[in-house]
Amino acid sequence: MGSIIFETERLIVRQYEFEMDADNFFALNGNEEVMRYIRGVKTREECDEFLKQNIESYKTNPLMGRWAVDEKASGKFVGSFAFIPVEGTENSQLGYALLKDHWGKGFATELTKEGINYVFAKTDLTEVYGITQAGNTDSQKVLLKTGFCFCKTYKEEEKQICSYVIRRNEI
């Protein structure tokens, strides 16, 4: 199993390992419903390449990345959690994607709460962002519930994007 990044009451967030995680990574990133508000779905080949890039990035920036999320009780893969740069800015963001079978269990809130703690404990960042498409009201509720504040709405390509922020001195 990949190095553990952090744990919550019910979940383990760990580095991906190619041999162990390629099928799960594809199940997540190749699923149209899961990716609806995140990015376009990827083919198996694209997923394999994307996973290899993510794993390689652990070497250059071990505190950031996209990581696997497993349920402690069952050991099952439930999704992915990310602490990554916001493209085109100096900012960083938290994000997650969960397999549909694990929606509605409170995992997103649990991951986001502990993800905030992780970022502020391991880095000197003063703020971190949560970014959603305007239609992704479920994720917006998670962000607000975990202490993020609405920042702004902007257009990216043809999509309306909502940006949220949480600052170290506000938690």
Image: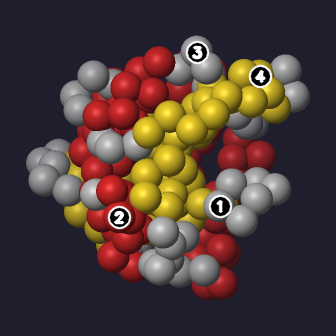
Image point 38% across, 70% down: which residue?
A: 120
Side (left or right) of 78 relative to 41: left
Picture disc at residue 158: none
Closer to the chain start, of discs 2 and 1, is: 1
* Secondary structure of the residue carrying numbered label 2: helix
Q: CA distance from mark 4 to mark 1?
A: 20 Å
25 and 151: which is toward the camera: 151
* Residue 121: quadrant of the picture: bottom left
Q: CA distance from mark 4 to mark 3?
A: 10 Å
Closer mark to the observer between disc 4 and disc 1: 1
Closer mark to the observer between disc 2 and disc 3: 2
Picture disc at residue 91: 1
Amino acid type indicated by mark 2: Asn
Closer to the chain start, of discs 4 and 3, is: 3
Classed neighbour count for the residue bearing mark 3: other residues with Cα under 10 Å, few (<14), some (14–19), many (≥20): some
Q: CA distance from mark 2 to mark 3?
A: 29 Å
Closer to the chain start, of discs 4 and 2, is: 4
Q: Position of residue 85 (x, y in %)?
A: 66, 61
* Secondary structure of the residue carrying numbered label 1: loop
Label 2 sits on residue:
169
Closer to the chain start, of discs 1 and 3, is: 1
Label 3 sits on residue:
135
Classed neighbour count for the residue bearing mark 4: other residues with Cα under 10 Å, few (<14), some (14–19), many (≥20): few
Residue 99 can be seen, yes or no: no
